Amino acid sequence: MKNSLAQTISTFYKKGFQLRLQKPGLPADGPLAPWLAAMSATGSGDQPISPVGAEVARLFSGRKTRVVYMHTAGSGITPWRRLIVLDADYRDPSAWASPAKVGLVAHELTHLLQRDLKPNQYWPSGGLRPSLSRRWVGDSTSFMEVVAYLVGWTVEYDLTAARAHDSGLPEDVRQRSSRALPGLRDRLATLSGPDVRNAVRLVLKIYPDNGVYRQNYRLESRLPDGRIPPGSWHAWLGRMGFARAALDHIWIVAAQGHLQQIDPVAFA
């Protein structure tokens, strides 16, 4: 344990800490500019490769966002409004070509949009809110994760599908991309299904070691409404500003997958 802690501290200092500001208008030198450019990349006919990613870029083109780069072991964090934390390795230009990493950034930016919604019972801003049952700072809900993964995994799917059909890439890269698509479709089918609690269990099944997800699940399993707000995921994405075409695109991709039923007993 001591060696692991020492290694983590050493890695933290080695990678450093950087706080940067993304200004409105998407100036090219902004910390989010390359990520938003990757999300809104166009293909044939100048149509966006990812309609959902293009929506994220549009929504953040007029926003001010603070970005922290530090060691996070590859994860992203959105602790409160207008701030996201990304791993220091995400400063490397090679990261911008990874569909999974672009999808993760889209996921975290969706959390920022969520933190501007009301009421706080379902959409906590992440700021200081003393409570006996929830985190005082950085509170979140399982439904927030379901919606954010719908966005992030759709972006990842679109960019991965583009790589699978890109004749300019090596054959092994295209085949690896093709093999990843069915699993992403199944995830989206399950997240977009009518049973939100089943969707929550899928996230927990995929990330069983995430302490925040486990804590939220334990709390919400004791609450009648599970901290799930009235209304569908697509209605709430619409409230965040996503255009209907982007929402329809999520539906279309999800409809090609197979909905998975996650056994609740495993999480009792």
Image (cartoon, helix red, strand yellow):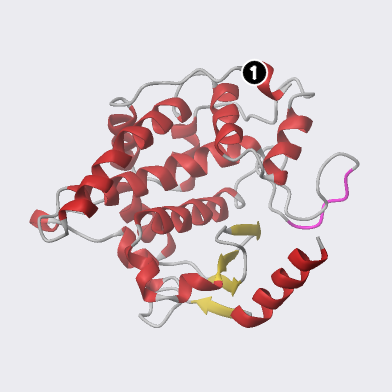
Q: Is residue 35 above or below residue 188?
A: below
| Quarter where residue 35 is shown | bottom left
Q: Residue at x 47, y 58 (%)?
A: 105
What kind of element bears circle 1?
helix
Q: Residue at x 77, y 67 (%)?
A: 3
Residue 48: x, y in percent? Answer: 22, 54
Indicate whether residue 166 is drawn in magenta. no
Confirm whether residue 239 shows in the render.
Answer: no
Residue 157: x, y in percent? Answer: 32, 44
Q: Is residue 135 above or below residue 5?
A: above
| Along the line of sight, the residue nearer the viewer: 105 or 81 | 105
Residue 257: x, y in percent? Answer: 33, 26
Q: Which quarter of the rendered picture does the N terminus lie within?
A: bottom right
Q: Residue at x 34, y 36 (%)?
A: 250
Residue 263: x, y in percent? Answer: 59, 17
| Along the line of sight, the residue nearer the viewer: 150 or 166 | 166
* Pointer 1 local density, CA inside 10 Å: few below 14, some 14–19, many at least 20: few
Return the residue at label 1: 264
Q: Is residue 263 above or below residue 5?
A: above
What type is the residue that disc 1 sits on?
Pro
- Residue positioned most to the right: 132
Q: Determine whether, in the image, residue 57 is placed left or right of residue 223.
A: left
Q: Determine whether, in the image, residue 118 is placed left or right of residue 153.
A: right
Confirm whether residue 202 shows in the render.
Answer: yes
Q: What span is colored magenta in the figure?
A: 127-131
Q: Which quarter of the rendered picture does the C terminus lie within?
A: top right
| Quarter where residue 150 is shown | top left
| Along the line of sight, the residue nearer the viewer: 6 or 14 | 6
Q: Main secondary structure of the magenta part?
A: loop
Total tally of numbered discs in the picture? 1
Q: Residue at x 32, y 41 (%)?
A: 180
